[in-house]
Image: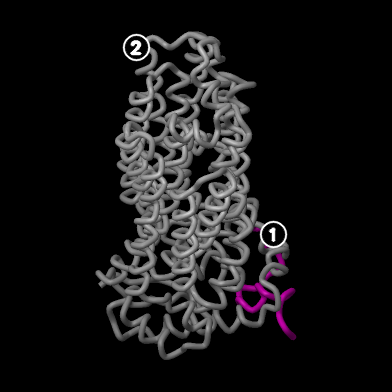
Amino acid sequence: MPAIVVSSGNGPPKEFEGKITVYVVICGIIAATGGLMFGYDIGISGGVTSMDDFLEEFFPAVYVKKHGAKEDNYCKYDNQDLQLFTSSLYLAALVSSFFASKSCTKFGRKLTMQAASVFFLVGVILNAAARDLAMLIIGRILLGVGIGFGNQAVPLFLSEIAPVQIRGALNILFQLDVTIGILIANLVNYFTTNMHPWGWRLSLGLAGVPAVILFFGSLLITETPTSLIERKKLDEGLAMLKKIRGTDNVDAEYDEIVYACEMAQKVKSPFKNLMKRSSRPQLVIAIFMQVFQQFTGINAIMFYAPVLFQTMGFKNDGSLLSAVITGTVNVLSTVVSIVLVDKVGRRMLLLEACVQMFITQTTIGVILQLYLKTNNNLSPQLAIVVVVMVCLYVMSFAWSWGPLGWLIPSETFPLETRTAGFFFAVSSNMLFTFIIAQSFLSMMCHMRAGIFFFFAGWILIMALFAMFLLPETKNVPIDEMTDRVWKQHWYWKSYMDGEESDSKNKIEDGVDK
């Protein structure tokens, strides 16, 4: 029987019994459907914004520019209202993630996921039935609230129910569902683009399917033992811990969780606690992982893949088909991450991906700089090379910065600052996703091929960050992160000076004395 090794906080590490149960896997698969909602929206937006029927109804100026015979290749979609259609969701998600962090603590991870599905479903209805731009944007805002709640609750849920030996793999189910959602959206767009004049409504309306799955599926799954115990439901927490671990011998682990919850509940303000010097490493890592995830340029490509391929000379069907190809690569490569993350570690995947992403972004930039001018198209041969480079780029992102951007912040915070800390991760992700979504088409218009060199430069910075400042967290139990990760790191250990091993000292500035 596999053992889960964790620290009691009051002595040496102990071995807690537990095995990988079918029930845990089922709970993980259902909860990860929150990623399906997120991914479907990422994938659907770019396809819908390239459909003539949609543009003609809501963005007629863009429709005219798109079909202008002498229109600049790089600027045909440069329109702030069009970008607002995509980016408004992420601004709403940024704000709602704060309330989601409070909901996770007060009402639990499970109920927060249910709320996410309800908000998302209402937004879907408004979008699919939209008659004007205001109705469209309000629908997007409600979708954003659903995304904010889902992205806050799901990764925490997955990390808290997972045995340590598969914590990385189980958590990456969320990102796997994101990639599956993107692929499904690309396939839907490919078939609906020729369904005139209502194909775009079908594309937007089908986003309700994963929301319905999450809502009804979440009725069947457990709340995490940590959340139950945190809310004083001690007997339920013990019973659920036995169920997900597949053994009755969970007293030691139960005591560990109770102790952590008691310490966490003494904190007056988790957000104030995050400002402590000893919380700086986790907070910096959580925020910068999200910033770097967006500045790889991935969402610029996934949002606007059909638009991007049209810019390079593909016709509408061809551009959507190319997006389907990259979506397939995205899914398969995320599976690679599930297999490797708990074997080779987080840092190895991140560093390898930086090399691969830098090469592909630079190659795309060089090709476009040399061969895609204002009004011409790429040759078929060069267009294929660009699609291959995009696939290699997506491949490397999908097994590294994509899933690990969510995994690492969800596993590094102690319980007393976990939901508050993960709020900063989610809100940072949404903020920079908003910035990229709102500015990418304008950046492409003004920077032209240089936009790919811009992202390549950020990838170099990311590589240095991962090499020198990001510690390895593979196979480290959540409750031992401080002693086994932060206190051992060449740089971050200086932030732990004066901290005793007893976990009570972790909350010294936020304790109700």
Residue at 50%, 75% (x, y): give it. 108
Which of the image's four quarters has the C terminus? bottom right
Q: Nearer the viewer, residue 82 or 462?
A: 82
For the residue marked with disc 2, what is the amino acid?
A: Gln
Cβ atoms at labels 1 and 2 below 8 Å apart: no
Question: At which x and y percent is residue 133?
Answer: 57, 43
Q: Residues within 10 Å of mark 1 (few under 14, many from 20)?
A: some
Residue range (magenta)? 493-513
SS at mark 1?
Answer: helix
Residue ID for mark 1: 495
Task: Write down the quadrant of residue 51 in the picture.
Answer: top left
Judge whether 353 appears above or below 291 on screen.
Answer: above
Q: Residues within 10 Å of mark 2 (few under 14, many from 20)?
A: few
In the rendered image, residue 123, in percent from the top left (x then y), is placed at 49, 56
The residue under the point 32% across, 85% down is: 249
488 shown above or below 162: above
Would residue 511 be counted in the magenta stretch? yes
Does 37 appear in magenta?
no
Tell me the tag on residue 381.
2
In this rendering, does residue 4 appear at all? Answer: yes
Q: Residue at x 51, y 21 (%)?
A: 66
For the point 45% across and 51% down, the residue is 38
Q: Nearer the viewer, residue 46 or 22?
A: 46
| Amino acid type of the residue that numbered disc 1 sits on in the rendered structure | Tyr
Left or right of residue 322: residue 106: right
Q: CA distance from mark 1 to mark 2?
A: 53 Å
Q: Quadrant of the N terminus?
A: bottom left
In which quarter of the view is residue 50 placed?
A: top left
The spot of residue 350 in percent (x, y) is 47, 42
